[in-house]
Image (tube, grey):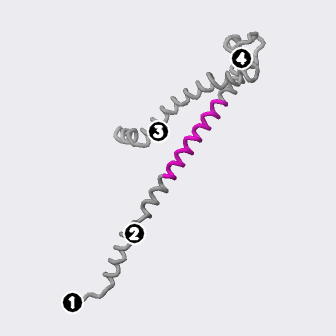
Amino acid sequence: MLNDFRQFALRGNVVDLAIGVIIGAAFGKIVESLVGDILMPVIGSITGGIDFSNYFAPLSSNVSSTVLAQAREQGAVLAYGNFITVVVNFLIVAFVLFLVVKAISTARARFAAEEAAAVAAVPRSEELLTEIRDLLAKKPRKG
């Protein structure tokens, strides 16, 4: 059983998946910073200084604060502004991944077309030699 687990864990697909998850987590932090530090402040300035991350609706009568962090300490809140930020993060990640996959697909198609063209393009001298060989093979031998 231990041997089977070792074979599973060291199989190429599992290692590739682990690397993908690690890179994905790092990429997620980059996108989170892009949205939180660059995009949302710009959107906030366009909308008149609105900070989406601080939008919430109190679910308890004990909540009197206008700051989300303090309101959470006072009672239950519905932090829909944070949800908007997370949705924007997701849309950006999905769009960037779409662009990456599209670029990879385009590059693969271009390389496959170049390889097919290189294989299909046989030099004229080789074509002539092939014809001569075929003609000599058909010619009856004297002997």
Q: CA distance from mark 3 to mark 4?
A: 38 Å
Q: State which mark lies toward you, 3 or 4.
A: 3
Circle 3/circle 4 CB separation < 8 Å? no
Circle 2/circle 3 CB separation < 8 Å? no
Q: Which residue is mark 1?
A: 143
Please give the range of residues in magenta.
87-110
Q: Three-letter amino acid code at disc 3?
A: Leu
Residue 1: assigned label: none
Q: CA distance from mark 2 to mark 4?
A: 80 Å
Q: CA distance from mark 2 to mark 3?
A: 47 Å
> What element does badge 1 sit on?
loop
Indicate which disc, 3 or 1, sits on the residue closer to the N terminus. 3
Q: Is residue 32 left or right of residue 124?
A: right
Indicate which disc, 3 or 4, sits on the residue closer to the N terminus. 3
Q: Image quadrant for the N terminus?
A: top left
> What element does badge 3 sit on?
helix
Q: Image quadrant for the C terminus?
A: bottom left
> Which of the 4 quarters of the picture holds residue 87?
top right
Q: Which residue is mark 4?
A: 76
Residue 44 x/y as whole percent: 71, 22
Residue 124: assigned label: 2
Q: Three-letter amino acid code at disc 2?
A: Arg
Q: Which residue is mark 3?
A: 17
Residue name at image x 55 percent, y 27 percent: 30
Indicate which disc, 2 or 3, sits on the residue closer to the N terminus. 3
Q: Nearer the viewer, residue 143 or 62?
A: 143
Q: CA distance from mark 1 to mark 4?
A: 104 Å
Q: Three-letter amino acid code at disc 1?
A: Gly
